[in-house]
Image (tube, grey):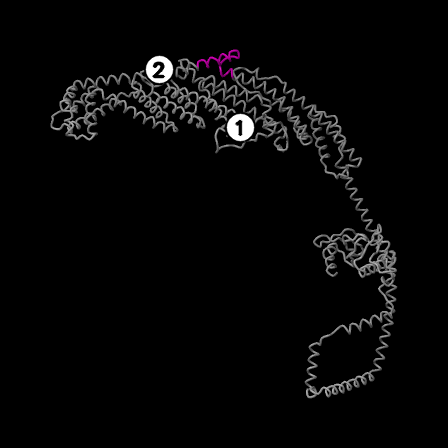
Amino acid sequence: MASLWSSLEKDVFNPQKKRLLESIRVWKTGKKKKMSILCVVVDTFRPMKPFLVKVKVERGEQYKVAYRWPLAELKLVDGKTLHQASLEFDLQLDKVYKWTANSFEEKKTFIRCLWKLNQRFLASSVTFVNVPPGAVEGRQRPQEDRKDTVETESQEELSVYQEMTPKEAADVLKLMEEYEPLVNNSVAFAEQLSNDLHVLDEANLRAILSSEKQVTQLMSSIDDALAEVARVEETLQIYDELLGSVKQQMDHIHQENSLLHRIVSNKTRLMDETLFLTTHLDLSREHCDALSRADLSSPSRVKACIAAAEALSGCMNIQIQPGYRKMQSVAEQLIMFETLKQNFENSFITHMTSIFELQGNAQVSALGQPMDKLSAPSHGLHHEELVPYAPLMLWLRNASPALFCDLLKVYAQNLSRLYDREMKAFFEQAKTFLLGRRKGSLQESLEKPMAMGSRQQSRWSLPGSREGQENTPDKGNIIKQMLEQVLRELRPLCTKEQQFIENFFQLSQGAANLQVTATQGGESTASPEDPPCTKPRSPPEEPTTQLLSEIFSCLEPELKGFLDICNRVHPFGCVQVLVTLSDSIFEMWGSSSALPSSFLNTLLGNMLLLAKSSFNKCIGNLSKEIEEAKMPSKMKGGILPSVSRFEEFVNFSEDIFRTARRRRELDKAHLRLLSSVFSSIHSLSSANLKVNTDMVMMENYHHVHCFLCQKEIQCLEDKKREAKQRYSEHMEKYVIKYLGQPLEKLNRFLEGVKARLAQGVKEEEVSFQLAYSKQELRKVIEKYPGKEVKRALETLYRKIHKYLTPEENLLPVVWHAVEQEFIRQYQEFEDLIQRCYAGSGIAMDFTMEDLLSYFNSITL
């Protein structure tokens, strides 16, 4: 019980500043399911109030207060012990609670505690039924008390055994040492102790008889003290009765005082809440009238509507308790606010829709501009007309996001119609400037370059005619100028529209939670340069981008059509379009005034993808034409058309890319086309040409190498070295093939000698071979006298001069190579004759000096 008591005090009542007086373990009568604990507690501060507390025991020996009743609510205590000992008892509070105690002693102790608290705090207001007076008062008759006391003392004397203390044991030992001679004789020792005890008793009696007078005085003083104590107790009893009534009055005063404080506190809170409601839920008459009229016809009235709408939002956004909404006045006020809000929303949306429709149906002013200047339309006046309504648009977005989104769609639909007409007129004018024709001849202008282009490609020349050669640079410049002007006009138009809708509709604030129009197809955007040097882009689902995509829905197809025309008016117009678009995007990104999430960035990125696709397609077609080109049957040599086509493309593209910020696509195109050129030149080996194939390949590779050296294109350095290598290889093959003609039979004879030596025949035994005897060698040498050799060299020179292209100036180089190779063969022949036909005196009819003089005379 002590542990239960301490646990209850520590865990339950001490934190609540209560003091535990008594506890009893009980359960409901007739339902012994779960035991509870009834506790009697009082406050630790004055005025002390007693309470009756029911504590439940949960799992893990955790205590939890289930009910608490002020003891003043207790009306009746029924002990049910009048005739027999019973564990049951009843307590009548708000209803009658029937309990069964855990033990009879706990029940008596608990009822006794209730009786004492009833006497002290409740002025005996509680009725006790079936409770013996002795049980609650804690008293018994004197005889019974005395009898019980004697019996208890006798039982304690019989049952309790006390062990000697160390001092008593020491005294016993000292006594035994003093009477050590008598210890062995127990009889003598006992007699001696008896005599000593008799002497001590006699001394005590004498001392008592001598102090009888003092004892009498002491007893008299004790009687006086007892009488004085009785008088003090009577006086204290009187004071206690007087103070009891005073205490009840003070408790009553304290209760009334606390009630007064509560009343004052409630009145103060009620006043604060009333002031809060009347202050924050009050909309002035001027604001109500402004919202009811919803007159937006003048700037002053628009400002009045803005102030009224903001005041209405302030009233409707006040956080009030749910219970206040049940009050009739508050409910009526909220209904009035909602009605004003809906009416003003409808009027404002109707007004803005009419403005949007008027702007969407406006006439296109671009058609009336002079034809000597290309300029995009301006919407500055439209924006200025809408700017005063920006605060109301922000209010509508916060008040009704769904209606705000619908109004955004209305704006986009109407402005899309206007921009559709304006963009078509703008691009029609741009096409007219580009083609140099009036509207009636646009189609004719487009068809003519296409027809010319097909003939040009078939003849393997860039323009194909003198007129085309004169007009091609001008057309390239016109494409560049017109495309740059179109982009310069579109940039401020899109940027201003984007800035306006972001400021007017406040799309940059909380745009993630705003459901605007449905997202369109997620086209990938192209960057003019891969990282590094990239800027962040807006995600496809950004409201600003979506809204601009709807407003400028016609811009992308119109710009795409214009770029298509730029590609068609010139065979290589796609090159100029690619460079201009890339430079324009670079310039836009480098501009501090450009918005980082500009809609035009995304649009131009898509156009750049198309431009790259057109460029790659053009390069692919050109590469395919170069590779699949068939050589003319009557071709006698010279530079191939594929090489000339490549040179024309390089000259044109390098001139365009001279000021470009990037050339990665061009480098790829150069590599691809040059590979096709090499493939086309290599295909000559299988062609049936009337001239030497090695000579044609040598000339063309030499021409490509010289052209690449002149252009100094970094990405083609490897190809330049390859062209030089192939040029050298084919020149060597060409020289070796034609060198055998002046000494053809001698060359054939000595080649046979070399074959015999390779087969293992000794040099001194070669002359004994029938086919390679000395006589046969003399016959062959006699056929090549000096004059005949000189004549043959002159014929060879004239033949080389005839078929080599003069523009390449390869004759001196080739003739010098022929001379060096002929001299090498002559020395080789002389050495072979000396080794295999030693001592025969056989030698060629001309010497080295003669041979050099032949070449010098031919060259001169």
In what quadrant of the picture does the N terminus appear? bottom right
Dividing the picture into quadrants, the one containing residue 50 is bottom right
Q: What element carries label 2?
A: loop
Q: What stretch is highlighted in magenta?
A: 431-452
Q: How crowded is mark 2: few (under 14 residues within 10 Å), some or many (20 or more)?
A: few
- Residue at 23 percent across and 18 percent down: it is 796
Instruction: Tell me where residue 753 appears, x and y as whole percent.
Output: 19, 26
In this figure, which residue is indicated by the disc labeled 2?
632
Query: Is residue 322 magenta-colored?
Result: no
Q: Is the magenta stretch mostly helix, strand or loop?
A: helix
In what quadrant of the picture does the C terminus appear? top left
The reply to whether residue 42 is in sight is no
Instruction: Tell me where residue 618 appears, x and y as whole percent.
Output: 45, 21
The residue lying toward the viewer, choosing from 492 and 711, is 711
Q: Which mark is residue 524?
A: 1
Asked whether the beta carbons under mark 2 and mark 1 sit within 8 Å of each other, the answer is no
Q: How far apart are marks 2 and 1 (CA)?
A: 46 Å
